[in-house]
Amino acid sequence: MRRLINTKVERGPALVLALLPFALVIILYAMGSAERLAENPNDKLLPGWTAMLDAIDRMAFEPDKRTGDYLLWTDTYASLVRLFAGVASATIVSLILGICIGILPVVRATLAPFVATIAMIPPLAVLPILFIVFGLGETAKIVLIAIGVAPFMTRDIALRVAELPKEEIIKAQTLGANTWQIIFRVVLPQIWPRLIDSVRLSLGAAWLFLISAEAIASQSGLGYRIFLLRRFLAMDVILPYVAWITLLAVIIDATLRLMQGRLFPWFQGGRG
């Protein structure tokens, strides 16, 4: 008897199956939009494709009458700078703390409970505190992203370090390696690809914190524009902005995955 779990999907059918949910969503949206627009041509909830294309052209390729900026690109640049700064800061802190917690018993006993507790605090709950401490500028937004994803990444890296074969640590000590040599020559080379996985898993939360911070206090950014235009029910702009954010997230994730495969082929091979 052929079991479903053993069924292999070839590349062609796999591509069709992957595109099927997207096609279904597009078809359902087109049907819903057509039905609503037939009843009310001025309906704003589900704008037609033409209206959204006109909005994209206006936001991306026509200068704003007030500022002269091309708003989509200005917002994208502002958001990506904040996102990369926050994620990069969290990555550096998480890498250092995660390795130390995972390999050093004293650090684990001291910091592991603290990091686990901090990870339970909803980052959005401390956003008002960040605005009070750091003001309404860029620092508060970057810090929110960093503290939002750093505890998770730290715990993930610590777990990955703890899962490394103990035989490797013992062999390194037998050969005379000290603690720092073990960290830099045994632990760190194996953690790099796992760190990329951790960053990829954290990107969704990072986008959430970014959009939230921009919606509350900002003068530019993708989140700022979406929450500004909601007052006018400008779904013809909001929906393309949401799609653009999704596309950016997919591109960043794919870039990290490609970088992981190029830099650490041994890791991808072992996973496969």
Image: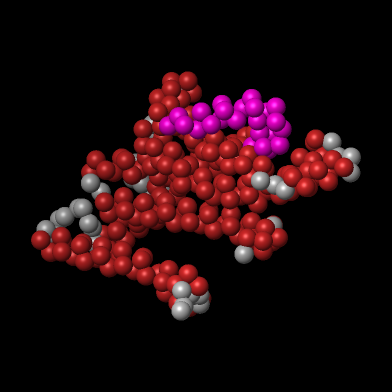
Foreground of the two, 190 or 47: 190
- Residue range highlighted in magenta: 98-122
Left or right, 233 with respect to 149, comes to left
User: Which residue occupies the foreground of this view, 244 or 188?
Assistant: 188
Q: Image quadrant of residue 267?
A: bottom right
Residue located 84% across and 36% down the image = 178
Asked whether, in this view, residue 193 is left or right of residue 166, the answer is: left
Camera-side residue of 244 and 52: 244
Dominant secondary structure of the residues highlighted in magenta in the image:
helix
Q: Residue at x 79, y 41 (%)?
A: 182
Q: Quadrant of residue 231?
A: top left
Q: Position of residue 136 (x, y in %)?
A: 43, 27
Left or right: where does residue 8 sit relative to residue 27? right
Q: Quadrant of residue 111?
A: top right
**Tally of marks:** 0
Residue 106 located within the stretch drawn in magenta: yes
Q: Is residue 41 above or below residue 208?
A: below
Which residue is outermost to the right? 176
Tell me if I can see residue 221 in this picture: no
Residue 161 is one of the magenta-drawn residues: no
Q: Is residue 106 left or right of residue 115?
A: right
Q: Say how the picture is coloured.
A: secondary structure
Residue at horizontal 23 percent and vertical 44 percent from the top: 232
Viewer-proximal residue, 117 or 4? 4
Q: Determine the residue positioned at 46% across, 31% down.
A: 120
Residue 119, percent from left and from top: 50, 33
Q: Position of residue 261 (x, y in %)?
A: 64, 60
Residue found farthest to the left: 39
Q: Residue furthest front?
A: 1
